[in-house]
Amino acid sequence: MSRDRYVDFLRAWAIVLVVLGHWLITALVREPGGEITAPELLATVPWTQWLTLGFQIMPLFFLAGGHAAGGSWARAHEAGGSAAGWVGRRALRLLLPAAAYSALVLLAVGVCSAVRVDRDTLALVGWAMAMQFWFLPVYLLLSALTPALHAAHRRWGLLVPVALGAAALAADTLVVAVHAPYIGLLNYVLVWGVAYQLGFCWHDGLLTERRPVPATMAAVGGLAFAALITVGPFPVSLIMVTGQDPSNTNPPSAAMLAWAVAQVGLCLLVAPALRRLLGRARIWKVVRPVGGASMTLYLWHMLPVLVVAAAFYLTGLAPEPSFGSPAWWGLRVPWLLVLGVVLAGVLLALRPLEYGLMHVYERTLAAGEAYRPWQLWLGLAASVAALTRFAVQGFAYEGRFPLLPTLGLALGTALLMAPRRRPVRPRVEEADGEVQPSEGVVRLPATARPGSPRDR
């Protein structure tokens, strides 16, 4: 079975839009006293909230992830692989780069704390470096639930995402009607789980075997979204805006669910045309490296903002027109270009780290893939709790070093790096030849792996 280039394209397209979206809305202003502040563009210039309709691309991450996970788990299960071994491998692929990134950022936080950097500045930087972390615990949970979710998919098919969507709507109704925020936390798994489960359906042809399905999803999802933001109580912004209640992302709302369904439908509608384009060698040559570096891009894309801020804003070299003015928007183009150049340098500098993580992952798989139940679930629980804490509070909440979540992430990663040592059953042969970093770590060339080729 050949790899699906369109799934790889979705990963690449999604990560490019995430990076550009974060860079676009990140605004730096030098105050009269010399302090650098970061006003919230979506709150200060309200019309920019409409831009989030194009930049909110996370449903495609979960759709592509579900597509890959459904095929991977089905093949592993048919070959006699265990659920614990499969879940542990996928969790480790995600945790290794996240833990390495966190360790380096936390080292910098520790040094800054020791030399008494201003706490407010440290807290702001720590938040900026963790703003993308919300995705990690949600994806870890869905990966852990994949064997059960896929079993439900095999039995009930499209009824499963429908049921998840209905549960998400019920939870969101409670959030809006009776202000039950803790109930809303379920929607992080339910709403994004709908897109993930639709990935299973897409992989097995349930969404494409009948022509009207993608068009119906796009139309119904789009109309529902329009109704929910006009007649309903939800804002148009698909990224959290301070002071907005309810929010479409914190937790994911009914409007976000509708947008996810519409986006999946549109994605399937354009798939045939884009697959033809991706069949061209020149286009694929551009797309593939971006998809291969997606996890690195996702984790590290805010570092260039700090570098450029220090080089141009702290020194006063950057021109500073009025915030939100036409001149300010005109400077967004060189802003994005400079950040792109810096990010390219960051990626080159991270090559040794990526290869090191690849070898750690390979050695772990070579040792064995049998996890004791307590080891697997404690490792996952500690990692999810730590990553959630970082996502909510950043790496330096109130300017302090986050000791407990740091220990939690270290414990979780260590447990998943230590499966029981026993001979490994040959793993099922997979279609593709590299781990997709949107779901895990770095490239694993077929010639470099122990045992058999990796799973997606």
Image: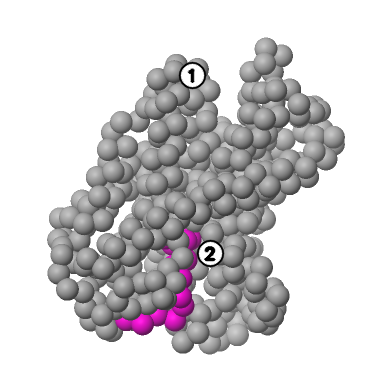
Q: How is the image coloured?
A: one colour
Towards the viewer: 55 or 399: 399
Quarter location, residue 309: top right
- Distance CA(mark 1)–CA(mark 2): 36 Å
Image position of 270 with respect to 170: above or below = below
Q: Residue at x 15, y 63 (%)?
A: 420
The range drawn in magenta is: 428-440
The quarter of the rendered structure image containing the C terminus is bottom left
Q: Position of residue 342 (x, y in %)?
A: 65, 44
Indicate yes or no whether the magenta region holds residue 281: no
Crowdedness near tag 1: few (<14), some (14–19) or many (≥20) residues, C-alpha within 10 Å = few
In contact (CB < 8 Å): disc 1 and disc 2: no
Confirm whether residue 227 shows in the render.
Answer: no
Q: Which residue is mark 1?
A: 117
Indicate yes or no whether the magenta region holds residue 431: yes
Q: Secondary structure at mark 1?
A: loop
Is 215 positioned to the left or the right of 91 in the image?
A: right
Q: Position of residue 192 (x, y in %)?
A: 45, 59
Query: How many circles with numbers are drawn on the protein?
Result: 2
Q: Position of residue 191 (x, y in %)?
A: 45, 58
Q: Residue at x 53, y 36 (%)?
A: 128
Residue type at tag 2 = Gly
Crowdedness near tag 2: few (<14), some (14–19) or many (≥20) residues, C-alpha within 10 Å = many
Image position of 70 with respect to 328: above or below = below
